[in-house]
Image (cartoon, rainbow, N blue to C red):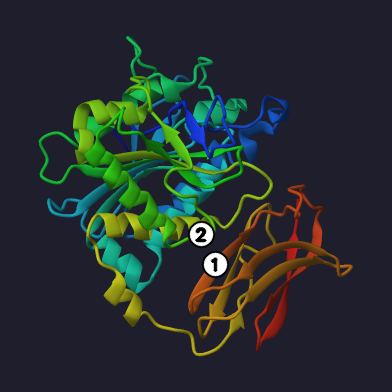
Amino acid sequence: MILKFKASILFIIPFYFGLIDAQIIHNQKCGIPPEESNHSRNWGYGYNDLLDDIEIWQQSQYVNIDSIGRTVQGRAIWELTISEDPSSITHKRIYIHARTHPGEEEAFWVTDEIINFLLADTPEASFIRSNTIFHIVPMHNPDGVELGYSRENANGLDIESGWDDNVLEPEVSVLQNRFLELSLAIPNPIQVALNMHSAYACKRYFVYHHENGTSSYFTDLEKDFISGIQHYYPDGIEDWDYFVSWSSNTPDQYPESWWWFNYAENVMALTYEDMNCSNAGNYNITAEAIVRGVCDYLGINLAGINDQKEIPSAYALKQNYPNPFNPLTTIDVQLKQSGGNIRLSIVDISGNEVKVLANNYFLAGVKSFQWDSKDRNGKSVPSGVYFYHLETSSFKTSKKMILIK
């Protein structure tokens, strides 16, 4: 598949005022504490990593990859279009963009797992692709990523809050133009627009917009949308009212502000905040919950598909891939039945438990887990041989993997 270039754009996240529970109030809804801002260059996943992934993604027959515009420093902003019929005039259209704030790399990992879920060779993924068109920008601010900035682009500006500027930053202009292109004079415009971020509150939540800044009808839609996603990850995603914004008025500087002023209730435009802390993880579970919740909101019924999906005939622990690896690897687990507790852990060569990747209930099927070569405290582990153990009430097994740095 040939990578093409054209003018267009992606999407971002607001610096909201609002309540985070009754007990947690932040001046900014996402990002990292200033004292922790001396992170490694490109925050562990850089522009070259993205280009490598693009080479992999473009091998799928269901992906078109375009450059929709360029940054201050001339880097291409890449967009994936995922669908079995991207030219359909009836498919539901969804837009997702991530890493407007470079230091919120968790936003990418959730987005990456959304891509993996949509491209999987499963009945659900096929059904979703045959009814939707997903547009995904994995890295909206690659200049900031490569410069090691936590929130800014190459001009030193927080482009999340620059949607009302008289002269738009290139990254904002690109995304705004793309939104217009996919919303004006086409029969199936964007209906859901998700702005992916991560917050050092160390919670997973959506930024809910109060009716004082939107409308009572829109807030009902928001509650249904957020609660619908939470339904698929009840222990992981906070209630709809965890972070309430726009309680005084409607700000005009954010992507969601732009959506509201131009399309009001016609577009469910929200910011999602993942966990920006050492406890972050479960990106695949989060991604699946988001995709399923979006489908429910758009009236795409996956219930019948779920009933028909193939269930493994036995428990199995697959070899991790890639192997050897650095720094990420994926572990697939086959579960022949639902129920009971599933525990997946990492152990070093001395037998010390390094990290627990899963320790809860899962439905039957094939599940994927990622390890980022960090221990339970979020510290990188040294190169060497490690083992991963799967344990259920009736099955135990282990496999070896190699980390090379």
Residue 235 in view of the camera: yes
User: Is residue 341 positioned above or below 32 on the image?
Assistant: below
Per the rendering, the mark at residue 200 is none
Q: Quadrant of residue 356?
A: bottom right
Residue at 15% over, 53% down: 88
Q: Amino acid at mark 1?
A: Ser
The residue labelled by disc 2 is: 284
Question: Residue 36 placed where, x, y %?
Answer: 71, 30
Question: Residue 180 placed where, x, y %?
Answer: 21, 31
Task: Determine contact: label 2, label 1, CB under 8 Å.
Answer: yes
Q: Quadrant of residue 355?
A: bottom right
User: Is residue 62 positioned above or below 187 on the image?
Assistant: below
Residue at 75% over, 55% down: 376
Within 10 angstroms of label 1, few (less than 14), some, or many (20 or more) residues? Answer: some
Q: Amino acid at mark 2?
A: Asn
Nearer the observer, 181 or 71: 181
Residue at 49% over, 21% down: 158
Residue 182 in view of the camera: no
The residue labelled by disc 1 is: 368
